[in-house]
Image (cartoon, rainbow, N blue to C red):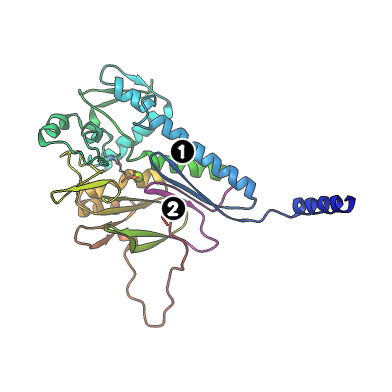
Amino acid sequence: MVMRLAGLLMLALLTCATPARADWMQRTEAIMGTRCYVELWADDPERGNEAIDAVMAELRRIDNLMSHYKPESQLSQINQYANERPVEVDKELFDLIKVSTHYSQITEGAFDITYASVGYLYDYPNHVHPTEAQIRAKLPAVNWRNMLLDEAHHTVRFEHPGMRIDLGGIGKGYAVDRGIEILKSRGVTRALVTAGGDSRIIGDRMGRPWLVAIRHPDNPNKVVTRIPLADSAVSTSGDYERFFDEDGVRYHHIIDPHTGHSASKVRSATILAPTATQTDGMSKTAFVLGPEKALEIINRMPEYDAVFVLPDGQVLYSNGLRPPAPRAPGAPAAATEARSARP
Ligand code: ADP
Ligand code: MG
């Protein structure tokens, strides 16, 4: 018996003494009404787990602040009272609303969080869309310029009756950036954080780039193209994410603020830039303005690149991503295989 105990003790000591094995760790959770995913390289599994916990907690915190589904969130308070009076909110939420107006400016109004004044009339899971008369009645409330933002007091006031806002088009990108900041502050040097269509990568996959797949709009198993990425953010918006079809019309979750209808000038838009707030903020542009106008805007901004899948299946690339000229026979291929950011 004593021998057995001594043996067990020895085994326990040996287990403790064995250095924890460095490895990739990953976890998926449902937060912000979507799939959130963290993958990182951890020297120590316990610290890796704690880092993933911290990112997931941050995503939940941001959701509680900004969700329009939660009546107690500060965003819901704005929607409830900003038609009557200025509503004071945390600096963090105020700043993100302000950032959203920057994207309204550079996208000529294609990105507009007041789209929600009409957007709330759509209910995709239940196949509900507004009538033309309903859209006409609510459309005048869609205009980001009618949001009065008071920098000194962090208040938001709507200057038009019937206005609503929704951060569904930028909140996930912002949350991903916050998650990445947390990982960096914990010394993580290789990781991916994804929330819905928004991802950001730090580092690479041990000397090789991540390969981010852009799916075919009608076939989730078919890949249109793959982009090698390291130290970058990427967002894809698609008309196949939240939608229903009726009488040959696709009603989906990206709304043209000028018409109140689903914006259908492209099938999907992928944007690359250093941060996920940037890529999320820009990924709706081509749907509303069309691919040519959107490319013109993207090509003017050196930090950004884009890939658009058009209704006829054509794929358009921004200047920084144009496929290289055909390889000379025998020349080596450029990118090596890694993992898709949206497996
Ligand atoms: P995901 O939620 O998967 O990241 P997107 O980045 O494509 O998807 O964002 C789509 C969301 O953006 C919609 O569900 C809606 O909340 C919001 N949205 C729709 N149209 C607009 C618009 N014109 N401007 C700003 N936000 C929009
Ligand atoms: Mg997004």
Task: Tell me residue 24's x, y (percent).
Answer: 57, 55
What range of the chain is rendered magenta? Answer: 186-211
Q: In the orientation shown, which residue stands out farthest toward the bottom?
A: 329
The extreme left residue here reads 133
Q: Report which residue position mark 2 lands on.
A: 232
Say which amino acid is labelled 1.
Answer: Leu
Q: Residue at x 66, y 56 (%)?
A: 21
**Badge 1, how many Cα within 10 Å: few under 14, some, many 20+?**
many
| x 22%, y 41%: residue | 127
Q: Front-most of 91 and 14?
A: 14
Residue 59 is marked as 1
Question: Residue 109 location in percent, x, y?
Answer: 23, 39
Visible in this render: residue 252?
Answer: yes
- Disc 1 residue: CB within 8 Å of ligand 1: no
Inspect the image, locate mark 2, and give the three-letter code of the amino acid beneath it. Answer: Ser
**Quadrant assignment, res 119:** top left
Q: Is residue 171 left or right of residue 157?
A: right
Q: CA distance from mark 2 to mark 1?
A: 19 Å
